Image: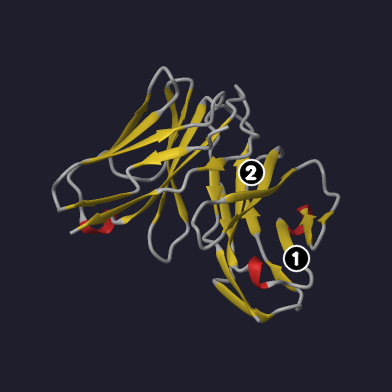
């Protein structure tokens, strides 16, 4: 079965601290896609990254970095030198690519608060 | 270019009534997804339409239904409303990709349904 777990419900850090958001997934497929989305207070979800199951290279984009480890079924997201504008709910998601009946499943989200 | 648009922004109904929510995808996108985001909870997958057909549905009762029109816009209908149906309903669109679902989702701002 397809499942995404974000065990951290809420995280609060002081500005400029580094913070890591955890994501653990379950799938029987060998081909799948993982995503991170950001939902700022305005409400509209914004795509951050997509990673396919065959690409375990970590990715860095500015202050954001993602650590994909198939051995532990994890796709963690780190924000370096956090800023107040990073405050949002972050969702990890999984899509199995095995059939046309695939759907994208989201985790329950982690609410990140960055205090000035 | 216009993003995903949803209407109405807010909707107030009473128990037992029916609600209809609408979604217009980004031009060129043929896949439309519906998610329910209840207060304090993550995104729960409701329905996925692609090329006018229902491809998959989540674990929701049959009183949640929808359709996709030839212009790829979509409607979500909720019959016999219950108090727990109060939530933000998010629509997302993506490029339909045939047999695999690899796409980034583009979300609308959502329709907030309140059931009294």
Chain for mark 2? A
* In the image, residue B74 above or below residue A35: above
Secondary structure type for disc 2: loop
Front residue of this view, candidates B103 and A98 = B103
A82, B39: nearer the viewer: A82
Number of numbered markers: 2
Give the numbered dot on residue A78.
1
Neighbours of disc 2 within 10 Å: few (<14), some (14-19), many (20+): few
Residue occupied by mark 2: A28
Coordinates of residue B41 in the picture (x, y in percent): 44, 62
Residue B8: % across, % down: 32, 43
Asked whether residue A1 appears in the rendered view, the answer is no
- Residue drawn at the location 38% of the way across and 45% of the way down: B59
Q: Which chain letter matches label 1?
A: A
Kindly identify the residue that appears in the image at 74 percent across and 59 percent down: A72
Give whichever of A29, B116 is nearer the camera. Answer: B116
Q: Residue at x 65, y 59 (%)?
A: A24
Q: Which residue occupies 38% across, 59% down?
A: B38
In the image shown, does B67 or B113 lie closer to the viewer?
Answer: B113
Locate residue A97, reporting x and y percent: 64, 34
Which secondary structure, mark 1?
A: strand
Q: Which mark is residue A68?
A: none
Q: State which mark lies toward you, 1 or 2.
A: 1
Label located before the other in sequence (1 or 2): 2
Question: Does residue B9 show up?
Answer: yes
Whole-angstrom CA distance, mark 1 to mark 2, is 26 Å
Note whether A7 is above or below B34 in the view shown: below
What colour-coding does the image apply?
secondary structure
Q: Is residue A92 depicted above or below B23 in this figure?
A: below
């Amino acid at each position: 079965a397809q499942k995404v777990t974000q065990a951290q419900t809420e995280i609060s850090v002081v500005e400029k601290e580094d913070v890591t958001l955890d994501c653990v997934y379950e799938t029987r497929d060998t081909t799948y896609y993982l995503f991170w989305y950001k939902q700022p207070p305005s409400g509209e979800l914004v795509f951050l990254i997509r990673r396919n199951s065959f690409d375990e290279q970590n990715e860095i984009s500015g202050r954001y970095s993602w650590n994909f480890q198939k051995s532990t079924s994890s796709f963690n997201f780190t924000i370096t030198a956090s800023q107040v504008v990073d405050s949002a709910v972050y969702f990890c998601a999984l899509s199995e690519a095995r059939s046309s009946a695939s759907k994208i499943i989201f985790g329950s989200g982690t609410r990140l608060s960055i205090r000035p | 270019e216009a993003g995903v648009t949803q209407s109405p922004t807010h909707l107030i109904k009473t128990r037992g009534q029916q609600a209809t929510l609408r979604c217009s995808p980004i031009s060129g996108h043929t896949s439309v997804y519906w998610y329910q985001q209840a207060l304090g909870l993550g995104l729960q997958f409701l329905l996925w339409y692609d090329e006018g057909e229902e491809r998959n549905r989540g674990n929701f009762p049959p009183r949640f239904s929808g359709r996709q029109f030839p212009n790829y816009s979509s409607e979500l209908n909720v019959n016999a409303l219950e108090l727990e149906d109060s939530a933000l309903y998010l629509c997302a669109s993506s490029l339909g990709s045939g047999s695999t679902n690899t796409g980034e989702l583009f979300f609308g701002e959502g329709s907030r349904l309140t059931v009294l």
